Image (tube, rainbow, N blue to C red):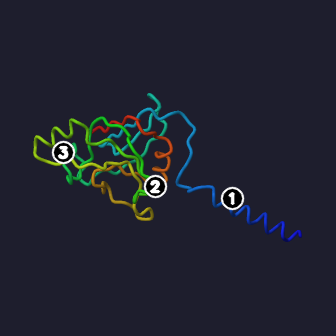
């Protein structure tokens, strides 16, 4: 009888442990992130609560980092004001949060030049976390380490404004 109780208890612990969820999904209960700022020249991203920096991260950008994204495939990270508008828990880059690029101004500029704007600009993690990424390797996104995107994913809500500075 005692052996059966021990076995049942161990089974229950294993079952409950399996229900604890994916460790990449963290919880955050601190101050609200009211604004995200990316300074491309510094390769730095800041998560702010009003004017207080809550967290900051080194970032990698698009493979052609200087200048504003004008067209699909140019390798540039956009510059301007956007919002965080979606999230992808199944991203090939661990986790990702979407940026509302292109906005109306971006579309207007691209249309005037006869280009397609592209899209799918995200803040995301790494595709291969055990490999040291070269500098500025994305197609226009903002990349951080996987453990950092876990924080960003937990802290930043859809609708949060983001400004990407040159």
**Mark 2 sits on what residue?**
146
Residue furthest toward the right? 1
Q: Which quarter of the figure is the N terminus placed in? A: bottom right
In the figure, 5 relative to 78: above or below?
A: below
Disc 3 to disc 2, C-alpha distance: 28 Å
In the drawing, does residue 30 fall left or right of residue 105? right
Looking at marks 3 and 2 on the same chain, the residue that comes earlier in the sequence is marked by 3
Looking at marks 2 and 1 on the same chain, the residue that comes earlier in the sequence is marked by 1
In the rendered image, which quarter is residue 30 located in? top right
Q: Callout 2 environment at 10 Å: few (<14), some (14 to 19), or many (20+)?
A: many
Q: Tags 1 and 3 in contact by the CB under 8 Å rule?
A: no
Which residue is found at the position 44% from the left and 42% from the top? 56
Q: Nearer the viewer, mark 3 or mark 2?
A: 3
| Residue 161: numbered disc | none
Disc 1 to disc 3, C-alpha distance: 50 Å
Q: Nearer the viewer, mark 2 or mark 1?
A: 1
| Residue 70: numbered disc | 3
Q: Callout 3 environment at 10 Å: few (<14), some (14 to 19), or many (20+)?
A: many
Looking at marks 1 and 3 on the same chain, the residue that comes earlier in the sequence is marked by 1
Q: Which quarter of the figure is the C terminus placed in? A: top left
In the drawing, does residue 139 fall left or right of residue 32? left
**Mark 1 sits on what residue?**
16
């Amino acid at each position: 009888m005692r052996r059966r109780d021990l076995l049942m208890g161990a089974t229950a612990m294993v079952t409950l442990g399996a229900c604890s969820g994916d460790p990449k999904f963290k919880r955050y209960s601190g101050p609200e992130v009211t604004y995200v700022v990316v300074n491309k020249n510094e390769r730095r991203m800041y998560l702010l609560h009003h004017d207080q920096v809550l967290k900051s991260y080194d970032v990698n950008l698009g493979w052609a980092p200087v200048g504003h994204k004008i067209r699909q495939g140019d390798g540039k990270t956009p510059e301007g004001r956007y919002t965080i508008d979606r999230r992808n828990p199944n991203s090939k880059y661990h986790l990702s949060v979407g940026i509302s690029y292109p906005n109306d101004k971006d579309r207007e500029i691209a249309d005037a030049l006869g280009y397609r704007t592209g899209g799918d600009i995200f803040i995301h993690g790494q595709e291969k976390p055990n490999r040291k990424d070269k500098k500025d390797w994305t197609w226009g996104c903002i990349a951080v380490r996987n453990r950092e995107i876990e924080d960003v994913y937990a802290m930043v809500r859809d609708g949060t404004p983001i400004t990407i500075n040159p």
